[in-house]
Image (cartoon, helix red, strand yellow):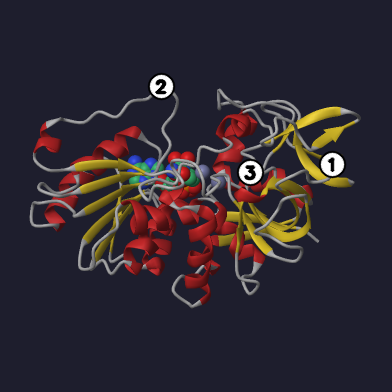
């Protein structure tokens, strides 16, 4: 079938919205008609050429929500009409990692996904016979996508698409960092560095876990106000001296839990140093630049601080994204402030510009 999609033709170039060909779903695959898709830093990172593992041509986008339009052979868990959220982090429910509660890093299709292929090593998108690779296994800057069933979470039919798509990436990452990775205890003191989609999700996750005090650190006063709306009790403008200020706020000890959601290694170090001795846990969700390292004084670890990394918030997508969506539908999370701009697919490059200007949290593409 023909569809419109935003193609990255070459690094550093604007995306070119055009008609491409999409093949039918094969065994274990599903055709999804997209209704909404968030525009994320990771898309821009690849478009810019900064990502050393990036490739072109490809259809970007990975924060999709839509409806199952058709299923290929051997698809058991999804049917036509189901509402779904795309998962760049799949869940096969069979591999050694899926069977272990300690991780969400499914091994089933990693290699082919990283190469821009579907699990069978081919692509479904093409143009005049030339293959166009898929991005993060999703390619959701398009009217339709074909994805493996294991990379789609079936969510409530009540969930509005423009909010459901937020669960595909940063929001679940932040929520999960607090709920799964750190498993914040009620009554705790938490510090969240960064008030983008991930950090704001972490603030909301700490609140849902019953944290008593939630300090949010960011450089932007507007973003700090959004953090207050998600449950932050203290707002700090970041920079040098942040660790000292957190120690002052916590009787000199530091926080029970800290979260890093900026991707800046200097901030990661602050997040480790702001965790308290004895049991302070620093959860790193931000993605650092290639080759960058985290500088930590080992004594901080000997004295009981721990550091954990968190990919997609430790969320096992098919099992847990629907639960998070239900909590949102039950009124536990307010997502309205996160959708700052609604744009059409043709305006996808404007979505990048808005992001670079730090104008709002998410631009969401709505498909007619
Ligand atoms: N682990 C995962 O699975 C996963 C998933 C999605 C995103 N990420 C990563 O999480 C990070 C955050 O993503 P996002 O979409 O929220 O990004 P974002 O750019 O919207 O937010 C980052 C925030 O950090 C703030 N910041 C920058 N420097 C700071 C400093 N010195 N002190 C305090 N705050 C500072 C910025 O003002 C901004 O509000 C990125 O590194 C992203 O790549 C990780
Ligand atoms: Zn994303
Ligand atoms: Zn798996």
Mark 2 lies on a secondary structure that is loop
* Label 3 packing within 10 angstroms: few (<14), some (14-19), many (20+): few
Residue appearing at x 49%, y 41% in the figure: 95
Residue appearing at x 41%, y 69% in the figure: 229
Relative depth, front residue between 32 and 48? 32
From where the camera sits, is residue 19 visible? no
Horizontal placement of 358 versus 257: left or right?
A: right
User: What's the CA distance linking mark 1 and mark 3?
Assistant: 32 Å
The residue at which mark 3 appears reads as 353
Could you tell which of marks 2 and 1 lies nearer the N-terminus?
1
The residue at which mark 2 appears reads as 291
Residue appearing at x 58%, y 29% in the figure: 111
| In this rendering, the label closer to the viewer, 1 or 3 | 1
Could you tell which of marks 1 and 3 lies nearer the N-terminus?
1
Q: Are marks 3 and 2 in contact (CB under 8 Å)?
A: no
User: What's the CA distance linking mark 2 and mark 1?
Assistant: 38 Å
Residue 332, percent from left and from top: 44, 74
Query: How many labels, in total?
Result: 3
> Residue 138 sits in which quadrant?
top right
Q: Is residue 80 above or below residue 71?
A: below
Q: Are marks 1 and 3 in contact (CB under 8 Å)?
A: no
The residue at which mark 1 appears reads as 23
User: What's the CA distance linking mark 3 and mark 2?
Assistant: 27 Å
Residue 332 has which mark? Answer: none
Horizontal placement of 211 versus 311: left or right?
A: left
Mark 1 lies on a secondary structure that is loop
From where the camera sits, is residue 253 visible? yes
């Amino acid at each position: 079938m023909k569809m419109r999609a935003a193609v990255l033709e070459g690094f550093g170039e604007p995306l070119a919205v055009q008609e491409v060909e999409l093949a039918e779903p094969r065994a274990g695959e599903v055709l999804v008609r997209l209704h909404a898709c968030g525009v994320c830093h990771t898309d821009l990172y690849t478009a810019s050429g900064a990502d050393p593992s990036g490739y072109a041509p490809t259809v970007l986008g990975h924060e999709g929500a839509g409806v199952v339009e058709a299923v290929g052979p051997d698809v058991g868990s999804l049917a036509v009409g189901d509402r779904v959220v795309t998962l760049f982090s799949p869940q096969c429910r069979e591999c050694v990692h899926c069977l272990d509660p300690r991780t969400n890093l499914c091994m089933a299709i990693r290699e082919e996904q990283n190469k821009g292929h579907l699990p069978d090593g081919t692509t479904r998108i093409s143009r005049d016979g030339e293959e166009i690779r898929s991005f993060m296994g999703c390619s959701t800057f398009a009217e339709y996508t074909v994805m493996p069933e294991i990379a789609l979470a079936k969510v409530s039919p009540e969930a509005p698409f423009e909010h459901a798509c937020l669960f595909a990436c940063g929001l679940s990452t932040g929520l999960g960092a607090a709920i799964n990775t750190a498993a914040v205890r009620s009554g705790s003191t938490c510090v969240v560095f960064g008030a983008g989609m991930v950090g704001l999700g972490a603030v909301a996750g700490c609140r849902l876990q019953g944290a008593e005090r939630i300090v949010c650190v960011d450089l932007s006063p507007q973003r700090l106000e959004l953090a207050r709306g998600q449950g932050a009790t203290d707002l700090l403008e970041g920079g040098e001296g942040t660790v000292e200020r957190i120690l002052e706020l916590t009787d000199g000890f530091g926080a029970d839990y800290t979260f890093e959601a900026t991707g800046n290694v200097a901030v990661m170090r602050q997040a480790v140093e702001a965790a308290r001795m004895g049991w302070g846990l620093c959860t790193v969700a931000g993605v650092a630049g290639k080759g960058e390292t985290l500088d930590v004084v080992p004594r901080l670890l000997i004295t009981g601080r721990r550091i954990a990394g968190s990919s997609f918030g430790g969320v096992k997508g098919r099992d847990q994204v629907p639960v998070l969506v239900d909590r949102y539908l039950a009124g536990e999370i307010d997502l309205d402030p996160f959708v700052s701009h609604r744009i059409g697919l043709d305006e996808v490059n404007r979505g990048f510009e808005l992001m670079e200007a730090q104008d709002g949290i998410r631009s969401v593409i709505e498909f007619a």
